[in-house]
Amino acid sequence: MGSMLYAVKIPPYGGDTLFANQYLAYETLSEGLKKTLGDLVGISTSTKLEVAKTRDNRLSDSGEKLKVMCASHPAVRTHPETGHKALFVNTAHTTHFEGWTMQESQPLLDYLFEHQVRSEFTYRFCWRPGSLAFWDNRCTQHNPVNDYQGFKRIMHRVTLEGDEPS
């Protein structure tokens, strides 16, 4: 449903988080593309290279093995409380559309991945020690900017359980 992130230690520069409004990402699509996406189901996995590498690094530090997780979600999700539609694919997890090959899916996914993080949909959150961010995972994407090499960023995260996307 949502996540909260609390800043414990922040690097002297960088480490911001970008939040992208997926209501706006959906609303600004053409009517034809909205119709195409209406019945599509995205297949997501934890094994996409950029995600698997980060998870593998964290788990290897703890001695755990990487668990492969897969899920299918509508490409457009209707928020259960607001009734608004939001784009619900993401570059970190979505690999293809159900019933489509990866090769067939890639051009449309590439377009959506670029579209959904356009600057006009995005807010940049600049962390300070003690900052707390709370966002709705059903209509928001977040992207931590990894631009603080050589420094530590220590955050505490809580993720709230939600409902099945529809």
Image (tube, rainbow, N blue to C red):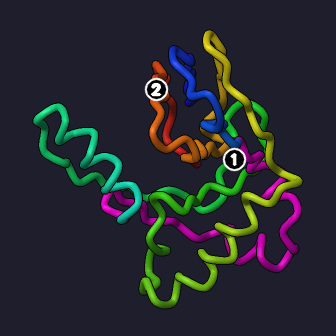
Q: Helix, strand, or loop for circle 2?
A: loop
| 80 horizontally vs 72: left or right | right
Q: Which residues are magenta?
A: 19-48
Residue 87: image location, x then y, percent: 69, 57
Separation of marks 1 and 2 at Cα, in angstroms:
17 Å
Q: Quadrant location of residue 137?
A: top right
Residues packed near mark 1 inside 10 Å, few (<14), some (14 to 19) or many (20 plus): some
Report the front residue among 97 and 126: 126
Of the residues shown, which amino acid type is indicated by label 1? Thr
Q: Residue at x 51, y 34 (%)?
A: 163
Q: Amino acid at mark 2?
A: Glu
Whether residue 158 is visible, yes or no, is no
Mark 2 — residue?
A: 161
Is 17 located above or below residue 12 in the figure?
A: below
Q: Residue at x 73, y 60 (%)?
A: 116
- The answer to whether residue 135 shows anywhere in this view is yes
Q: Residue at 65% of width from left, 51% of height from top? A: 77
Return the disc, 1 or 2, that comes first in the chain's sequence: 1
Q: How many marks?
A: 2
User: What is the quadrant of residue 39 in the picture?
Assistant: bottom right
